[in-house]
Amino acid sequence: METPFQVPVYLDNNATTPMDPRVLEAMMPYFTKQFGNAASRSHAYGWAAEEAVELAREQVARLIGAIPQEIVFTSGATEGVNLAIKGVAEMYTSKGNHIITCQTEHKAVIDTCKHLEKKGLEITWLPVDATGMINLQELEAAIRPTTILIAIMYANNETGVIHPVREIGAIAKKHGVLFFTDATQAAGKIPVDVETDHIDILTLSAHKIYGPKGAGAVYVRRRDPRVRLTAQMDGGGHERGMRSGTLNVPGIVGLGKAADLCRLEMEAEAARLTTLRNRLQEGILSLPGVVLNGHPSNRLPHTLNISFPDRDSNSLLLQFNKKLALSAGSACTSATLEPSYVLKAMGFSDERSYSALRFGLGRFTTEAEIEWVRELFRQELGS
């Protein structure tokens, strides 16, 4: 049937978002007319690039309640995660060798921690309950005299479940342990404030907030306490010595603009997406045996994870792929045929984990699209 919108309908905004045209407009001059290197401080082209970078630094800082000097630009959240975790492990080796994290973290965190584990660091992998939440008492009990870092994501990329970040930060502060959160899915979608949340290090990525791929940032606290990271890339001492390399000026400009738009429009956007998400959820959960995965209310406004009985996600994706862009879980693990490790950690069976689909709504998702998707599922899977 003909539709007034583009098909396949894109509902994989947790994997990546389309660029906002306002972001592209801000970036364009820095590909052509203002092409200078931000580290070239001897002429006007370099000054213009540096000025653009510093504006973006301010914009990113404002989004998360930081100050501009605490923002370090990277190529994205995966690089940021590596800098954060390995940077702490190497810098604070004299204090200890123990890191606490969670079984449902993004692969960037899990694989980085596994890498450090092979090098002799001790990693505690906290479990989660059936809604995907960690137990704060278990977290506090896991802290040792040698604990140097707690690494818990702000919101899960598969289920959208939001961890009690403020309470985690308070526990970390009470015990004098650094707190790092991967806020890639949360920043720009829900309010994040590094001060009230007691966050010491945070990562985010432009392409999750309607900006360009290949640009991200790490927040590194400057006081109370002053956090120091060992650089993972050497060569020139850019970004306060924490991340060498010629800055991606157009990408950074795009990240800054995207962050500013999110800050200004987040509240209204979250309300709209929550309404659309709940409408979609209501329609799909009306199908026989379908179940919601994750916390029913404590989750991101745009994320929905559902298991379909007696189906597997790969066959469902094949069935719908000409009409819908969906995923069975994280884009970073979609090439594997294993059941979702996030859902398995929540205690679900292989069958339930294999039959899960993730719906990620976004800024450009329309009410008409959601109504069409509801009807599509009713026609295809209703009995």
Image (cartoon, grey):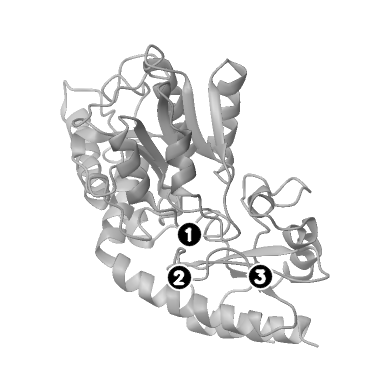
| Few, some or many residues within 10 Å of mark 3 (<14, 14–19, 20+) | some
SS at circle 1: loop
Quadrant in which residue 226 is drawn: top left
Q: Please, what secondary structure does the residue beneath circle 2 have?
A: loop
Relative image position of residue 371 (x, y in whole percent): 57, 85
| Residue 251 seen in this snapshot | yes
**For the residue marked with disc 3, what is the amino acid?**
Leu
Residue to which mark 2 is pinned: 364
Rendered location of residue 172, percent (x, y): 34, 37
For mark 3, give the secondary structure: strand
Question: x, y (%) of residue 93?
Answer: 41, 14
Residue 103 vs residue 357, the one in the foreground: 103
Q: Give the residue type that dot 2 points to.
A: Phe
With respect to residue 354, does 234 lie above or below? above
Looking at the image, do the residues carrying marks 2 and 1 touch, with CB atoms under 8 Å apart?
A: yes
Q: Is residue 4 visible?
A: no
Residue with the mark numbered 3: 324
Provide the residue designation for mark 1.
18
Give the mark nearest the N terminus, 2 or 1: 1
Lateral position of residue 185 relative to residue 383, left or right: left
Q: CA distance from mark 3 to mark 1?
A: 15 Å
In which quadrant of the rendered image does the N terminus lie? bottom right
How far separated are the C-alphas under marks 2 and 1? 8 Å
Marks 3 and 2, the one that precedes in the sequence: 3
